[in-house]
Amino acid sequence: MTDFLLELRSEEIPARMQEKAREDLSRLFAAELDKAGLKAAETISYATPRRLALILKGLPAETAAVSEETKGPRVGAPPQALEGFLRKTGLTADQLVERDGVLFAVVDKPGRATAEVLAAAIPAVIRAFPWPKSMRWGAPSLSTESPRWVRPLQGIIALFGSDVVPCEIAGVTSGAATVGHRFHHPGVITIGSADDYVEKLRACHVIVDGAERRNIIALGAKMAAKKAGLSLIEDEGLLFENAGLTEWPMPLLGRFDEAFLAVPPEVIQLTARVNQKYFVCRDSEGKLANAFVCVANIDAADGGEKIVAGNQKVLAARLSDARFFYETDLKVPLADQAGKLEKIVFHEKLGTVADKVERVAKLAEWLATEKIVPNCDPALARRAAELAKADLVTGMVGEFPELQGLMGGYYAAAQGEDPAVAAAIRDHYKPVGQGDDVPTDPVTVAVALADKLDSITQFFGVDLKPSGSKDPFALRRSALGVLAILLDNGLRFPLLLSVSQDVLDFFADRLKVQQREAGVRHDLIDAVFALGGEDDLVRLLARVKALQAFVGTEDGANLLAGYKRAANILKKEGVGTASAPADAGAQGSEGQSNPGPLLSQGNGFAYDPEPAEAALAAALDAAEPKATAAIEAEQFEDAMAALAILRAPIDAFFDQVTVNDTDPVKRAARLGLLARMRDAVHKVADFAKIEG
C-alpha cells in the first residue's frame, strides 16, 4: 500500500474559504477515486493561506480487474434490437454470452495503475472545484475553457510514494518541489513523500494544520493577556480568521490610549475585530482594557516590538475615527435624527422608515394601553418606538451597521431619555436568532413586539410573503422572535385581533419549527390549531403540551385508537360534527337517511340498550361537562384526565355492540353515541390530525 500527496500552491486564499476548500478537496478526490474502484484507508487535508494539501493513505498500486456485464435482448429478438445492442457494446454477435435465453455482453477490464487514475483525477478535481469566487490568469485565460482557481496556481506537488504523478494545469507542471514561509524560508523545498511533507514544511516555518495554528493562537493570546494581568475575550470566528491569515502565527499584545475607553466598549471591540482582526482584553473587574492581541505571521528578531508599534499606530487611527463618529452623533438629539428617516425608503410599497416608525409607535402604545404587555407605560412605549430607528442615520451606524439599536441606546441614555426608553431602543431588535436574549422589560417588549408584528403584517399585506427558501425580509426570523417574546413573557395576545388568518397560519408553521427542538410534536400543534379560533399562543402551547403528555400514556393511546375507529365509521356513514353537520339528506352506507345533527341530542334510548351502550352514555355524561369546565379554566391536564375515563367504555362498546344494526333506531342511537364521543374529544383537539 502506498500514500499519495497532493499540494496545490497558489497566491493567498481568503481565510473565509479555506476550511470548506479543504473539505471539498477531500470530497471531490474521493469521488474521482470511487469511479475507478479505489478507496483510501485514510484521508487527511490541510489548508494554509498559500496552499491546499491532501494526503491519501493506503492506496493499492493498481485498481482491481473487473468484469462488466450488460444485459441485452432475448435470443430470437428482432435483428434491429440485436444490432443496436452490438453497436452500444462494440462487440460482435459471436462475443455475446447466452444465459437462460438472454444475451449478455461481458467485458473484462484489466486493472489500471493507480498513478494513472491519480493523474487523471487531479485536473478533473481542479476543474470541478466549487470556489465561491475564482479567476483565470496568464495566456491560457484568453480561453473560457481554461482552468479556474481561487488565485493563480504557482505549483503542484503530486507524489505517489516517492514518484511524481505527471500532470499539467494551466501551464503548471507537477513535481516534488514547494516553498516554505514567505519570509523565513522563501526558497525551494523538495518533498520526498507524503511521510515527510508536514515536518519538512514545519522546519521551514509553515504549519500546514489549521487546527494546530488555531491552538497556537488561542493559547498564545491567552498567555500574552495573562502576562499583562488581563483576560482574553475569546472569539472563535476571529480565531479561524487569524489562522487563515498566517502560516507561522505569533500572538503579540499591544496597548492603546486609555482615553479611547470613553467610547462604548462594543465600538472598540468591533473596530479592533472588523478592521484589524485583533482580539481585545478585559481587566480584573471585567471591563474592557486598553489592550489588544494581534497575530503576526513572522517570528521577528526583536520579539515583535516593531510589529506591535505599527499595529498600535494603525489601531489608534481607527479608534480616533470611531471617537469622532461617537462625539459627533452625541451632539444631535435622537429626535432630530429621527426626522431624517422621512428621506429613507423602507420599501417602495410600504413607504419610508418614518412611516414604519409611526406604525410601530401606535402599535406599541396600544399594546401597553390594552395591558397586553402588563406594567408598561404607554407614553414610554410610544417614545421608545419613535426613537428606536433614529440611530440608522448616525455616523457610527453608517460605519458599523452591526451597532444599530445598540448605539441608539447609548445616545438616548447620554441625552437624558428615560432608562426604560434607552433600554428599549438598545434591545428592540432582539431576539435576532436562536439563543439570543429575549426582552423582558415591559417597554422593550412592547416595542420589540410591535416592530416585528408590523414587518410581518405589512409585507403579508402587500403579498410579499416568504416562499420556499426565499425570505428576503427575514419574516420567518421576525415570527420566531414574536413567538419567543410572547411565550417567554407569558403574554396573552389574541393574534386574530391584529393579524389575518394567513399570518396566523404562518405563525403556526413557525411555532412548529420553534418547538421542534423542545420535543413538541408538530401534529399536536396542528390538532389544536385545527379547532379554529385558537390564537392565544400561550394557551395553545399549554394545551399542546398537555395533549402530548396524554397521548403518550396508555389511556391516551387507546383513546386515540378508539377515536380514529369511531371517526372512520362516522365518516363512512356521512355523519358530520356538531359544528359541521352532514347534509340532512345524505344517505348512509345502507341507503338510510343520515341521522345528522339529531344524533348529538341527549342519551335517551327508545329501546333497552346493551350494557356497553349504557356505560358509554354514562361515561360521556360524566366526561363532557368535566372536560368543558376544565378547558374553560385552562386546566388542560384535567381535561385530558376527564377524557381518559372514556377509554374503557369505548373499547367495550366496539367489542360488544354492533353499530350498524338492522334496526334504524338502534343504528341512529349508536352512531349518535360515537358522534358525541368524537365531539367531546374535539373540545380538546382534532384527534384526526394526530399521527399514530
Image (cartoon, rainbow, N blue to C red):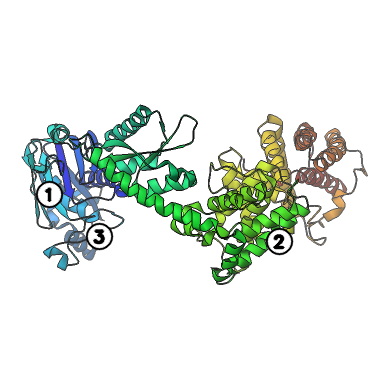
Image coordinates for residue 225, horizontal then vertical, percent: 37, 31
Q: Earlier in the sequence, mark 2 or mark 3?
A: 3
Image coordinates for residue 682, horizontal then vertical, percent: 76, 46
- Label 2 sits on a secondary structure element that is helix
Vertical placement of residue 477 versus 654, above or below: below
Label tally: 3
Image coordinates for residue 431, horizontal then vertical, percent: 57, 47
- For marks 2 and 3, give the CA distance: 82 Å
Q: Residues within 10 Å of mark 2 (few under 14, many from 20)?
A: some
Instruction: Name the residue carrying label 3.
Output: 77
The amino acid marked with disc number 3 is Ala
- For marks 3 and 1, give the CA distance: 57 Å
Q: Quadrant of the N terminus?
A: top left
Instruction: Name the residue carrying label 1.
Output: 155
Image coordinates for residue 311, horizontal then vertical, percent: 30, 45
- Label 1 sits on a secondary structure element that is strand
Left or right of residue 359: residue 28: left
The amino acid marked with disc number 2 is Lys
Instruction: Name the residue carrying label 2.
Output: 362
